[in-house]
Amino acid sequence: MTPSDAHARVGLFGIGLDTYWKQFPGLRERLEGYLGRIEKKIRGADVVAAGLVDSVEKSEAAAALFRTRDVRLVFLAVSTYALSSTVLHAVRRIPVVVLNLQPEPAIDYARFNAMGDRGAMTGEWLAFCQACAVPEIASVFHRARIPFRQVTGTLDDPEAWEEIQGWVDAAHVAAVLSTTRLGILGHYYNGMLDVYSDPTQLSTAFGVHVQHLEIGELNVARKAVTTGEVAGKEEEFREAFDVAADCPREEITRAARTACALDRLVRDRGLGALAYYYEGTPGSEEEDIVTSVIAGNSLLTARHIPVAGECEVKNAMAMKIMDAFGAGGSFSEFYAMDFNEQVVLLGHDGPGHLAIAEGKPKLKPLGVFHGKPGKGLSVEMNVRHGPVTLLAVVQRAEGRLALLAAEGESVPGPILEIGNTNSRYRFSLTVKEFVDAWSSQGPAHHCAIGTGHVASRIRKLASLLDLEFVQVC
């Protein structure tokens, strides 16, 4: 997972029936041992443990604990049969995942039946009785309109624990988003209607705080940059990029100065993501700034502060989500279709996520920024070969947001060496099927591309945030 100050808190409690404890000595202690094993295996979150809940009073106490500790997700470990009345209070208004984890794949029937003492045998059976309570709990949750999810397996089941970890990761990302300050610098690219969005809806859906910024702030910061800071940033460029020999010295210095100013703006404003676009009048200081931001924005993106061009605010959120999942998240759009190789080329001018590049990204001079004013340095990179996930934040006609994902592969082959990020992607669908399926969901023409297959985790995040989720492949 991506390092973050926003460490998710998840609740954990087991359930049982207090009537059993006197009837079956040692059963409660055994079940508490199961609960301890589960707690130790949860990674990447602070676990708020409420212990074994076996009465309505303990359920109410667990609910109070989870509220005061601000947990984002509760794991309900079904330890044995328990009354649903002991569950209901503990999980109201908090997303819950029911863990139906048996201690072993099966009861040892021969050993069980040889025990002789039917009371002891019943106690042994109750230690395997997780599935008994699950339908009752599910019934009550449905009738109470409490959303829930289930994971079924054993205490040592790798598939079940992959699923559990996915929920922990989703809770972590939800926590990251809720503490993210999203900067909006400048304005939308005029006429690019698909990127226009509702910042209020983004704040409501993800919990982010939107901060509108003035280009003058960046200008003031740029004028305060020292010669030493510029020299240090130029050295950082040489470490991060394969700097093309034809990059003019003055362009490197110009980009370095702007990069230092961007660092100051991000630090002073506490930004966790940024969407930007500006043009300025010809020859103005503002134009000088916005034509020299690409290198610095790429460095910021690699430092977990994703930057989306053309003021594509929705895609800044998609990039932040991918980065918080540890997958990167590079700004992309459809470039071309290769019907011969059945691959789609996606990329973009402007910043890329340097941490997920295949090889060292190139820094190249461009005599013209297509569709934009000015000229300057640009980044050319290829996303690391292997599994990838595409993510778009989609705004529906009624205003609600949805998460749209696709899984595929970044594959080797020729790219367009034009000083832009671009890569070749192959999907389980044909090129025709993929482009049609993706576009039919109504996304903007931008998306975020990250490494690894993380659609199942994005699905869980959507569930926690009560957002629609669509996966086309």
Image (tube, helix red, strand yellow):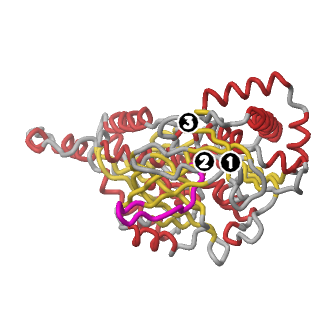
Q: Decide if residue 443 is in sight here.
A: yes
Type of amino acid under label 3: Asp
Q: Residue at x 77, y 56 (%)?
A: 277
- Label 2–label 1 contact, CB within 8 A: yes
Sequence-wise, the earlier of marks 3 and 2 is 3
Image height of 302 relative to 463, above or below: above
Nearest to N terminus: mark 3 or mark 1: 3
Q: Which of these two is toward me, 254 or 392?
A: 254
SS for callout 1: strand
Q: Alpha carbon of mark 3 to alpha carbon of mark 2: how far?
A: 43 Å
**Compared with residue 230, is residue 468 higher up or lower down, i.e. above or below?**
below
User: Which residue extends farthest front?
Assistant: 246
**Residue tagged 3:** 46
Label drawn at residue 24: none
- Residue at 58% over, 43% down: 353
Disc ID at residue 419: 2
